[in-house]
């Protein structure tokens, strides 16, 4: 182990890319680097602010639902306004949940801003109500205005980040009880991908490195593009990207690492997807529940099922009548 570390340090000094970093180097050479450290730190700060706002919204909403009369006295409005306070609480809870769900936080923060506007308008009209306490209402209004400014700042940051890079990056890891050779052989034939990627309609191999992809888009539309393999390490890794000028800008890689003691294979999938229409396309995907971050995990779990059992477990044709091809618990586990 010590000798291996020394060999890797020497190779780095000599300018050689270590074995585990070859895929990242290929992405940089192709101009489609998946992850940038500075943007990742910026994204973490934005996610932290959004998460804080989401939990604040849920906590406030639960208090308003459980103790509406006490909240009315606290903010300075008449206690007979408690039904409206409880309604505000349910809205706050819904906004908070929307912010915390992966891939929907931007839309959730913007929806929360709409709720802030309603709250401020309500506090303004409450000043004219008999039985209200103007001093408390003024303090509550100032606090609400401060939270609104935070919401606006967070929403603008996330929207600006989306405009700077309309791409959505996803990285998923999973252990599969099959050998790297079996998994590599199956994945390398891209025509197998629609068998477990439910958003893919077809992949047609055009030559030894290129293929034509057809995917399902929002509202029953289809999206097509051509892709090429840019790195192929037998039984170890495959990296591909869409060709220049394609309708979809897409880059992906999959690595197969043998688990210790012949315990199967650790599979790592990285994808970067720039939807049609940039930020607008991302918004449409979010509205239709077809955002890559919500589906890649489920796709990889179906790949695991297919390789370990020979089939993907579905509920299609069962009395439950669900439109999805997997169970509710499976869908939720895949999104966690």
Image (spheres, rainbow, N blue to C red):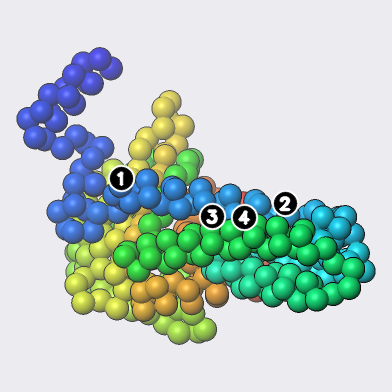
Q: Percent from the top left, x then y, of residue 51? A: 56, 51
Instruction: Identify which residue, 294 or 198, lies in the foreground.
Output: 294
Disc 2 from disc 3: Cα separation: 14 Å
Mark 1 or 2: the one toward you: 2
For image coordinates 21% across by 70% down, the residue present is 243
Label 4 Cα crowd, 10 Å radius (few <14 / some 14-19 / many 20+) = many
Instruction: Identify which residue, 303 or 8, lies in the foreground.
Output: 8
Note whether 245 is above or below 149 in the view shown: below
Residue beneath disc 1: 37
Label 2 Cα crowd, 10 Å radius (few <14 / some 14-19 / many 20+) = some
Q: Secondary structure at mark 1?
A: helix
Disc 4 from disc 2: Cα separation: 9 Å
Discs 3, 4 touching: Cβ within 8 Å: yes
Name the quadrant containing residue 69. bottom right
For image coordinates 73% across by 55% down, the residue present is 60
Residue beneath disc 2: 59
Check the image and name the residue furthest to the front.
135
Question: Would you say 201 lies left or right of 324 here?
Answer: left
Q: Percent from the top left, x then y, of residue 7? A: 16, 22
Residue beneath disc 4: 54
């Amino acid at each position: 182990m010590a000798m291996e570390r020394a060999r890797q340090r020497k190779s780095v000094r000599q300018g050689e890319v270590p074995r585990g970093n070859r895929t990242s180097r290929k992405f940089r050479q192709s101009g489609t680097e998946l992850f940038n450290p500075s943007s990742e730190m910026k994204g973490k700060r934005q996610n932290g602010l959004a998460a804080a706002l989401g939990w604040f919204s849920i906590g406030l909403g639960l208090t308003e639902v459980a103790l509406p009369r006490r909240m009315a006295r606290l903010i300075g409005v008449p206690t007979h306004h408690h039904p409206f306070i409880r309604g505000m609480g349910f809205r706050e809870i819904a906004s908070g949940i929307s912010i915390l769900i992966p891939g929907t936080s931007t839309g959730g923060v913007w929806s929360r801003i709409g709720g802030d506007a309603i709250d401020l308008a309500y506090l303004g009209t409450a000043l004219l109500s008999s039985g209200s306490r103007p001093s408390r209402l003024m303090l509550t209004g100032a606090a609400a205005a401060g939270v609104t400014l935070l919401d606006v700042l967070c929403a603008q940051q996330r929207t600006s980040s989306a405009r700077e890079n309309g791409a959505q990056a996803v990285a998923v890891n999973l252990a599969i009880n099959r050998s790297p050779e079996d998994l590599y052989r199956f994945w390398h034939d891209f025509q197998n991908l629609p068998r477990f990627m439910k958003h893919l309609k077809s992949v047609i191999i055009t030559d030894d490195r290129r293929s034509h992809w057809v995917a399902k888009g929002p509202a029953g539309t289809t999206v097509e593009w051509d892709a090429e393999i840019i790195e192929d390490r037998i039984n170890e890794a495959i990296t591909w990207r869409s060709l220049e000028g394609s309708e979809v800008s897409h880059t992906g890689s999959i690595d197969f690492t043998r688990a210790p003691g012949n315990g199967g294979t650790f599979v790592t999938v990285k994808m970067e997807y720039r939807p049609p229409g940039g930020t607008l396309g991302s918004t449409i995907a979010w509205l239709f529940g077809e955002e890559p971050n919500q589906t890649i995990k489920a796709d990889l779990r179906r790949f695991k099922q297919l390789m370990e059992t020979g089939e993907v477990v579905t509920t299609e044709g069962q009395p439950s009548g669900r439109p999805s091809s997997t169970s509710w618990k499976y869908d939720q586990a895949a999104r966690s």
